[in-house]
Image (cartoon, rainbow, N blue to C red):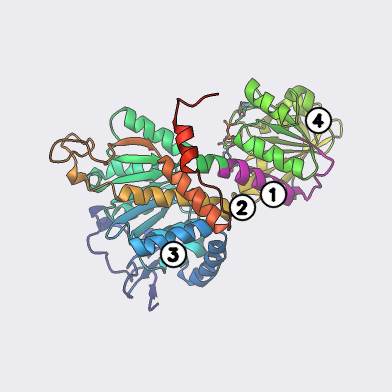
Amino acid sequence: MGLEWAHEGGMGRRVGAGSRDQGMSAARRNAVVRGGAAGVSPESQVADPGQAAVGQARIGWTEQAMPVLGLIRAAFEREQPFEGLAVAACLHVTAETAVLVKALTAGGARLHLAASNPLSTQDDIAAALAASPGVTVHARAGVDRRTYYEHIHRALDAEPGLVIDDGGDLVNTLHAERPELLAGVRGGCELTSTGVARLRRMAADGTLAFPVLAADASKTRRRFDNFFGTGQSVIDGILRATNTLLAGKVVVVAGYGLCGSGIAERARGLGAQVIVTEVDPVRALDALMQGFRVLPMAEAAPLGQVFITATGSRDVIGPGHMAVMRDGAILANAGHFDVEVDVRALAELAVAVHPGVRPHADEYLLGDGRRLILLAEGRVVNLVAAEGNPAAVMDLSFAVQALALAWLAGNGDRSERDGRGGAARDARGAQTQILAPGVHETPATIDTQVATLALASRDTEIDALTPVQKEYLDSWRQGS
Ligand code: NAI
């Protein structure tokens, strides 16, 4: 590819970089790749450019598990929906993200990527992306908070027409520290519910300057990520950490939401006797009718051999429950925060702790000789002890992102809008298709498109409504 790798000091400045770049010290750059070949971004900040080949091989493997993005990439190549547009993205720098990035650049985007969490940055992937045409990467594992935000600023230097965020840090920085760039942004996508909650607060006080699609709430993401993805990967994490046999074991799943019901179903599939605990009568009834035993945690505690929390709440398993658990019981959490199992209470109950009896498994010895095994220190077990969602699940979520961005790219330039920052109006004053600033649902047609492509990629066909059926379903006149 004709790339010239250079470390500290050897970097030429990017033409048009924002003023914040002027003061960027050499110490803030860990490593820099300077591009010379056509289409290659001239500046990236990655840990070790030499890992590009390793990263590329891993991206190649992952691409095979992401056929929907492959189909979208081919369409983007033909249609060039992002032609001439800079996209600033703040995402976990993983192989799956790389497949998304490559689809967007195939569609004509100039992609400027910063990490949404330094702990999740895979340096080989960052290096491979830095060597991809049209991509600039500002990410390396383990950076401090200052460098993390510095990287976000470098991505924003691209003067983006579109933004992609995972948690809201990029959009927040853009509004708080780079307001001069807001006018050029057509719209953005946010992946997480945490980020969407931040955006809704910004929209409520009138701060949010452009439309953002809340991809977290798309049907595709909720159903496939949480039920199938988390359902499988949580079991995967528990098995990797313990190598336990689930067949015949009593598994207690706390919370029968999208994640919990997926976990319960997978555990049952492996032969476990599954007990569900709930606080919502409708969800509890659902679990009961699905054939699970439903009990309060106080009654499930002495029966369970594996406990999995997936509630989004706190202290779901407390000292009273631990006091009656069976010897060798395994405690795992799938909820977002590490507060579902009361780890502090467990430490107080224990007379000795044996950390790391296996990777990601700590043994707590209680006064009466019973041992309780805590996985991943009570943090999300599928992310700590396994690899999070499989690529095939991310394929669907990222396909929603890619199509949502293409949809936003057609959202027009903000200069076309009316002076009040609202949606644009045509010459006669009628509102055009352009979205107003605020948080919007992902269009339902995108879910349908993604599912259609996913079925096609699996060689699966379905029936279509006949005109007569359609008329019958649309009509209120036809009854019994
Ligand atoms: P959800 O809202 O669909 O389900 C949560 C369920 O827990 C509800 O049915 C609720 O009634 C129940 N619940 C609340 N307090 C309870 C208690 N004390 N005892 C028993 N049940 C209780 O939420 P969802 O989407 O299933 O997510 C659950 C948690 O998992 C959240 O913290 C979410 O952030 C997290 N999550 C984790 C993922 C992972 O990869 N590990 C992926 C997606 C979400």
| Cβ at disc 1 under 8 Å from ligand 1 | no
Question: Is residue 446 positioned above or below 259 on the image?
Answer: below
Confirm or deny contact between disc 2 and disc 3 (CB under 8 A).
Answer: no
- Is residue 271 shown to the viewer in this render? yes
Q: Earlier in the sequence, mark 2 or mark 1?
A: 1
- For disc 2, the marked residue is 387
Crowd tier of the residue under label 1, counting other residues whose Cα lies within 10 Å: few below 14, some 14–19, many 20 or above: some
**Secondary structure type for disc 3:** helix
Give the residue pinned by disc 3. Answer: 129
Which residue is pictured at 70% across the width and 45% down the height?
Answer: 235
Q: Amino acid at mark 3?
A: Leu
Horizontal side, residue 40 vs residue 54: left or right: left
Contact flag, marks 2 and 1 (Cβ < 8 Å): yes
**Outermost residue, bottom direction?**
2
243 in magenta: yes
The residue closer to the viewer here, 461 or 98, is: 461
**Cα–Cα span, label 2 and label 3:** 20 Å
Q: Is residue 106 above or below residue 341?
A: below
Q: How many marks?
A: 4
Ligand 1 quadrant in view: top right
Q: Residues at badges 1 and 4 in contact (C-beta under 8 Å)? A: no
Amino acid under label 2?
Glu
Given residues 369 and 461, the one toward you in this image is 461
* Residue range corresponding to the magenta coloring: 224-251
Mark found first going from the N terminus, 1 or 4: 1
* Magenta span includes 85: no
Q: Which residue is mark 1?
A: 236
10 Å neighbourhood of mark 2: few (<14), some, or many (≥20)?
some
Query: Residue drawn 61% across and 52% down?
Result: 387
Report which residue position mark 4 lands on.
325
Q: Earlier in the sequence, mark 2 or mark 4?
A: 4
